[in-house]
Image (cartoon, rainbow, N blue to C red):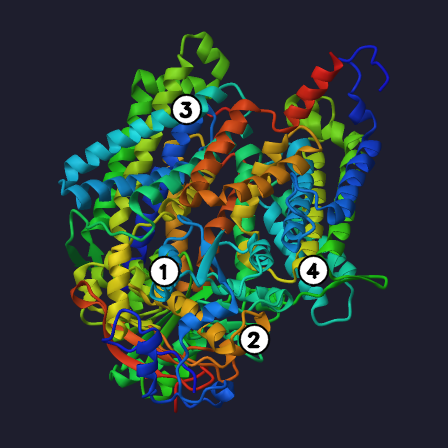
Amino acid sequence: MRMFTMAAGAAVLSLGVATAAGATTPPAGTTAGTAAAGTGAAAAVDLCSAAAAGPITIVHLTDVKGESPTAIDDFSNGSALAAKQINEQCGKEIVKVERIATDFSAEAFETNVLKAQEMKPTVIIGQGSSSQMSKNSLVTDGGIPTLWPVGTASALKGGENYSELSWMLRVVNDTQGQVWGKYVVDAGFKKAWMECVTTQLGVSGCGAAEPILKAGGVEVIGRSDSATDATDFTNSVTTIKDKGADVVVLAQFPRPTLAFAKAVEDNGLAGKVKLIGSTSTELIYQALSPAAQGSMVALADCNPPTDAPDVAAAYQAAYQKGMTSLAAVTYDAVFMTVDAVAREGSTDPKKVAEGIASTHLKGVCQTYSDSGSHALAHHMVVTSFGGGKVTTEKSYDLDADGKALAGG
Amino acid sequence: MPPASDPALRPPAWRQHHYLAIGAVVGAIALYVQFGQYLHLPGLFGSIHKQSGLSAFNEWLLLAGLTTSFYLVFGLAGRFAFSMAAFYGLGAYVSHWATRTSRHNFLVGTLAAMVIAVLLATAFAVLVRKAHHFYFAVATLGLSEVLLLLFQRVRRLSGKSSAEIGNAKKIDLFGWAAHTRYRHVWVILAALALVLVVVAAVERSALARRAVATRDNPTVAETLGIDSTRPGITLFVLGSALAAMFGSLFVHTRSVGTPETFGLKLGIAVFVALILGGLHSMWGGLIGAWFYTYIPQYLTGLQQWTQVIWGAVLVLVMIVLPEGLVGVFRWLRHRIRR
Amino acid sequence: MARFVALFLSGMTDGVVAALAAVGLLVLNKATGIVNFAHGDLITLGAYLGIWLINGHGWGYVPAVTVSLVLMFAVGVVMERVSLAPLRGKSVHVVVIATLGLALALRSLVGIWQGTDPKRLESPVPGRSTVFGATVTHHRLLIIAVALVVLVAVMGFFARTSWGRQVRAVAADRVMAQLAGVRAGTLSMAAFGFSAALAGLCGLLVAPLGAIDLNLGFGIMLNSFAAMVIGGSGSVGGVVIAGVGIGLIERVIGGYVLTDYSEAFPFVVMILAIALRPQGLFGQREHAARL
């Protein structure tokens, strides 16, 4: 089986020889039949061999700086670091990341996706906004494999925004909802309040938590569906206080998350009610008071400082800030591309797409693979923020389709 | 061009020959699209031999149509409305709703969108008929916010669990399938030509004279027996209906849309485009929309400074050309005549 | 009862903040005829100045707020000089575009200066009390108190000082006022500075309620437009009543019925108010001389 693995504790990058060594003991679950399509049996592929297939260009649609409150640098830093490390390890430039600055709004996005495709890259890394999934028909027409650092259920196979050339690098929203529910049940909470958010893509995964909560014997005392720009949560917090909830599924992001946590704290509920935030809460938790940080946990795709300390340290050294899961997924996307080219021995989009479909990459965030649904992520963590750092509290495995908790 | 006996009394030639001018401009755009395809002309409109260039070009034409519709409301009637973007969105959502499950053509959807827009705009305009200036503007701001909330929450419009429109019906016109970006240009350009003709017809009508009289001096207009509210209402309704038409074109050419697309940002963009182009010319929308679509594209390389520079550009254009970019053409014509 | 008190207080806070922002807009509008779309971003800037001095440099609240307000005044004056003075006498639309341009530039500059991650500012009065079972944070009381004192002071200022009379004169009849010796340039600069300082105060007051990011001021500005219009841009008192009314309707009524649509309430009320009283509920016809 051909694979690339990043052995923790080895050099910063486990490329070439180190990779081959790591691959002799493949991690559990690397038995996906699709990966056997290659020629070599158990030999890991040397990423640097990808150079033989020609130059690899990745176009990364990067958010214009200053447009969104968060996540701007993380996505672009991740892909930049990965390309730098690969090129340094191989001693020559084998992968190049080009950037197209894209506005966070959807209007000009079509033009930008087309521009990216016209550059004829090996792979496109999309922008981290789910609202752009509806543009997946462009991806099909353009013929360039595209990796999205988001998770949107409608873009999985069978969904209305599905494209055979698009893959989701992160756990999809409904599955996040299930993880929310499972964690609340597992942690033994009794009374839950659901603070959901209505985005243009519908009510975030929040809804998927509810059946799991009920099945697990957790009483749902109420639910509010607030707007993405809500600023005042007096109504919700008063209800939480009246009915004595001990946990809140907090699907909001970003400023409303902070306003909600502040309202909880102001009402003397810090420490009495646990808030379970959405993914990306890791980007903003530092704007919470220490007490509020203590009463918050949140979902994330991974926690790089724990999952891949070497890469996280290199990131910290390069950008003077902690590596988030968002940076990790675009970092992994670059490796996944080079890995696919190396295994297929070609930069032809069709071949690369086959390479991604048969990927079995142990990246920073997780081991990526596609069982056919085009969900590459099968793992989620719940993190806490005590003491000003992100700590993994619990991790959850998802089923092969990336659509549900394994066995739940 | 015949020499004018008294230039001060005679309207300029381009105003006398409105329809000819429209034919010339639309024809020039059509020629550019036709031959730019093959000649790979670089220039002011991006690289339209590429799909990305065509996509931006269509974006320009749509914004130009929307802004020219706004010219009726704001330029002629002097009524500032934030609601153009919301009516554009209304057009998109209604047309999608009308066509998504039925066999109806996009024309039926467009018609439905315009009818609903006329009804809503009339009801609203009559309700706030006494409001002027800032009051009217803020009332339309309120209308936009309410409409956006409805797009967001009324799931029947998008036909699914989210507010996002996906896979809107493609455009088919009597057997001609306009499924490519290149063909979209012709459809949108035709709509733009239609709006320009409507504007030209309105400019020549008594309606425009009454509207302008009311805009410039309501008290005098009323003394002269002009009903001071009707021209404003008529033009507001007309402009809103045309906005809905372009909204319908937007959704059937792009096939997707979200409430955010039709938010305040676009409402302000329409305003900025019209003022940048020139508030007192029917061509202002076309030119302003070009500036608004293409200039920021050249600035994105500046990364986080993009918005700072764009903001500064807006201030600067206003200082240098308070009459808008149309002023450049006027100045040129003036120079040529000398 | 506890719920009502909590909702009432949150509505009051939102209301006085909207009123404070609206009065800043109103002063500027009366003195210069301009509607400043950069007002929301000035509110945001005020909050960031507070963060910069208090969190970044460890200043006390009183000096930090004082210096922030002085800086905000200066920012207002500079804005007037670089972009609006060259447009004096030009159509009001042209000036509005210039303020939109300034708003974009200002927001991005703040982002470049302070970063785009959300920030936090502690309240100077962190305690809380319980009233009828509802938790009342002292910061909300502080907001209401400060806002009311400032609003009363502004009203007094316009009623009694020569500067206030000049503004009222300009508002009533610009040309006549200038003929009578009112110096429009100075007045315009002062009004910009004053309005920006009020915006800054707004930002400083609301910052500790939640978190601060670049969008902080925009929503407040929209509410303040509503307050200004419903109040009738003739009177500070009317604007205050309107602002508080909007806040209470959104929070208190929205807390009990149609909760998921409560954001639309202020706008529906506003449209109805404009329909019934096109000059605003408390406005007078056209040239309102009162401020």
> Residue A354: percent from the left, percent from the top?
54, 78
Q: To which residue does mark 2 refer? A: A351
Residue drawn at the location 39% of the way across and 91% of the way down: A407
The residue carrying mark 1 is A84
Q: Is residue B286 above or below residue A319?
A: above
> Label 4 sits on what residue type?
His
Task: Say the numbered circle drawn on residue B252.
Answer: 4
Q: Are marks 1 and 4 in contact (CB under 8 Å)?
A: no
Give the CA separation, mark 2 to mark 3: 57 Å
Residue A368 percent location from the top left of the image: 41, 78
A260 relative position to B138: left or right: left
Circle nearer the viewer, 2 or 3: 2
CA gap, disc 4 to disc 3?
A: 44 Å
Sort mark 1 into few (<14), some (14-19) or many (20+) by Cα contacts within 10 Å. Answer: some
Pick the residue in front: A71 or C209: A71
Query: Residue under mark 2: which chain is it in?
Result: A
Q: Is residue B302 above or below residue C96?
A: below
Question: Do marks 2 and 1 share a subunit?
Answer: yes
Q: On the image, numbered disc 3 is attached to which residue?
A: C82
Q: Please report contact status of discs 2 and 1: CB closer than 8 Å, yes or no.
A: no
